[in-house]
Every structure is written in structure tokens, then in C-alpha cells.
Image: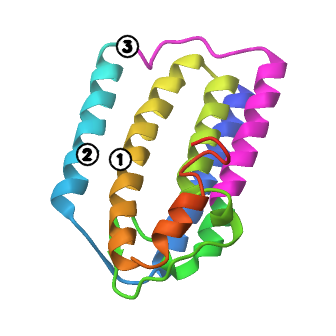
Amino acid sequence: MHSVEAVFAVVWAAFWLYWLVAALSRKRGHVQWSRELRIRALVVVIAILLIRLGVLGGQDLNTNPWRAGVGLLLLAVGLSFAVWARVHIGRNWGAPMTRKDEPELVTSGPYRLVRHPIYSGILVAGVGTAVALNWTWLIVVALAGIYFLYSATVEERYLGEQFPDTYPTYKHSTKMLLPFIF
């Protein structure tokens, strides 16, 4: 394993370990498992097909130090943004498409910039990983982006129902994933 690849593996592992530990403090909620399982199953099937077809394997790693540096910067910025959002939302965080028993609408901190900063941060970090290691990882980022866009759309419908007086104004004034753009 190359040193750049090892750094990315360690950083991603530390991020997901933090994520699992932080999930222990969330509020109770309900996930519509049939919808959640269908979309996750579709993503897994596509990933397995890509692996079986050899799209994600056997590729040479990037050896350009500038690309590695830019990728590492994007990884750090993206994961830092996601962690900031996770810390800021606190116990209100939940698995994608979860309805909370005692919901609160969080619109401050990173949520002032975008409505779904955790998704945004993870996608930026994924792009950084692709830039640094191998462009074919953009396929994984695209799959995650499709899943996050679907999850965000479902979550926004729930939030509109739970906060009919305040969510439409917030939604109108804040972009979904990319500040000032989308």
C-alpha cells in the first residue's frame, strides 16, 4: 500500500469510527425501512456489478504529488465540514431519512450554508479521494451523490411536514448541497 493510500485509509477509518460512536447519542427516531433498504440494496448491487466488471479494481494509483496534496486538502475540508455539521446538529442527527420523535429544525452553523452539510462534506471528501488516488473512484462518489440526493429529497419532505411554518423559508433561503449554487 502506498503511503498516500494509507493516509486516506486511516483518515476515512477514523471518520467512520467517530461516526459510529457519535451515533450512540442521537434522539430516537423512525426509519421507513422498506424505502431505506430498497435504495441501499440498489447501491450495493451497482457497486458489486462495478467490482465484478473490474471497473473499481486493478487501477494504477496516482503518483502525482500535486494531485495527492489537492486530494488530501479536499478530504480534510470535506470531512471537517461533515464533522462540524454532525457536532452542531448534536442529538438531532439520525440515519438518512429518519423521522425524529422530538424534531428540532437546526438552521445555524454549517446549516446556514447548506441544508445538508453532512452529505456535502462527505461528497467533497470523496472527490478528494478520487483526485488523490484514482479518477475511477468518482463512480463511487457519483453513487453516493445519487443516494444523498434521494435521501435529502425525502428528508426535506419530512421537514416540510414537521415544520410547515419555518421550513419553507429556510429551504428558500439556503441551497441544498453547494453554497450559492445548488
Question: Where is 76 relative to 91, above or below?
Answer: above
For mark 3, does the 10 Å Cα neighbourhood hold few (<14), some (14 to 19), or many (20 or more) residues?
few
The residue to which callout 3 is attached is 54
CA distance for labels 1 and 3: 27 Å
**Residue at image x 28%, y 46%?**
40
* Left or right relative to 71: residue 97: left
**Residue at image x 29%, y 37%?**
44
The amino acid sitting under disc 3 is: Gly
State the image quarter where residue 103 is shown. bottom left
For mark 1, does the 10 Å Cα neighbourhood hold few (<14), some (14 to 19), or many (20 or more) residues?
some
The location of residue 13, given as percent across then percent down, is: 58, 50
What label does residue 111 carry, if any?
none
Mark 1 in CB contact with mark 2 (< 8 angstroms): yes
The residue to which callout 1 is attached is 150
The boundaries of the magenta stretch are: 55-82
Q: Nearer the viewer, residue 147 or 107?
A: 107
Q: Is residue 70 magenta?
A: yes
CA distance for labels 3 and 2: 23 Å
The amino acid sitting under disc 1 is: Tyr
Q: Main secondary structure of the magenta part?
A: helix
Tell me the SS state at disc 3. loop
The location of residue 9, given as percent across then percent down, is: 62, 40
The residue to which callout 2 is attached is 39
The location of residue 27, given as percent across then percent down, is: 43, 83
